[in-house]
Amino acid sequence: MKITYLAHASFLIETKSGIKILTDPYDGSVGYTVFELSPDVVLTSHKHFDHGYTGSLKGDYVLVDKEGEFEVKGVKIKGIKTFHDKENGQKRGENIVFVIEDEFSIAHLGDLGHELAASELEKVGKVDILLIPVGGVYTIDAKEAFNVAKAINPRVIIPMHYKTEKLKFDLGKVEEFTKHFEDVEILQTSEIEINSLPEKQKVIVLKYKG
């Protein structure tokens, strides 16, 4: 499985069979480069400008933007309804957590705004690779993200949705999250290929591509 961190909460995930899955594409107002891509599947956790912009995408892709269980081009995808805030969506609406089942199980938490209840964790199930927002302000913050990661207990954790020099609004820094972990690897690349899982839990910080 190949994972490319485009920026913010947007990743391009290429499965073992070559299916390209794009998560949470953003528009130009966010500050990052907007890529013209031709994915097979697009997952959007909600419709905000920094997570649901599809205007630059090309090709005949399948959009998944709701809860439920789907099989798209041979890939099993589960959408789990959560919220963008701690008030059951009253402030910022709903958020969809996606779990992709392929060679490994990978979860993308979108703009999750609260820690997960036991019933939600049960729906998420076993996760090998976790893509988790850590910057706070609009999502769970670093400490809450640590609690969520601990509850899900994946082997690989890749933080997203944090402040960088290109992002045009304020979020917390990724270091506020990574300081809670023993095994952290900071890469100077946006792409990683995962062929096997580490024996112990590991945080991998990817450099955004955009």
Image: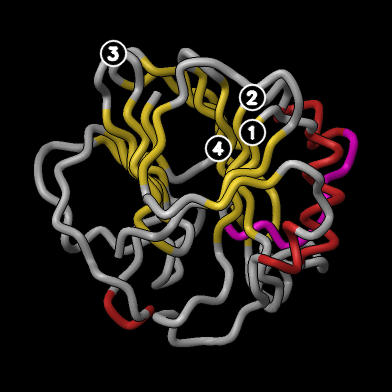
Q: Main secondary structure of the magenta part?
A: loop
How many angstroms separate mark 4 from mark 2 (CA)?
A: 13 Å
Label 4: state its secondary structure: strand
Mark 4 or 3, closer to the camera: 3
In the picture of the structure, the residue carrying the numbered disc 2 is 128
Task: Residue 192: tell me if it is visible.
Answer: yes
Note whether 97 is above or below 46 in the view shown. Answer: above
Question: What's the mark number on residue 98?
Answer: 4
In the picture of the structure, the residue carrying the numbered disc 1 is 156
Q: Closer to the N terminus: mark 1 or mark 2?
A: 2
Q: Position of residue 9 (x, y in %)?
A: 48, 58
Q: Residues within 10 Å of mark 1 (few under 14, many from 20)?
A: many
Q: Contact (CB < 8 A) between labels 4 and 3?
A: no
Note whether 153 is above or below 56 in the view shown. Answer: above
Instruction: Look at 55% across and 57% down and name the residue there.
Output: 160
Instruction: Look at 60% across and 31% down and name the residue there.
Output: 129
Label 2: state its secondary structure: loop
Q: Contact (CB < 8 A) between labels 4 and 1?
A: no
In the picture of the structure, the residue carrying the numbered disc 3 is 17
Quarter of the image for residue 152 reads: top right
Mark 4 or 1, closer to the camera: 1
Q: Closer to the N terminus: mark 2 or mark 3?
A: 3
Quarter of the image for residue 191 reads: top left
Q: Is residue 194 magenta?
A: no
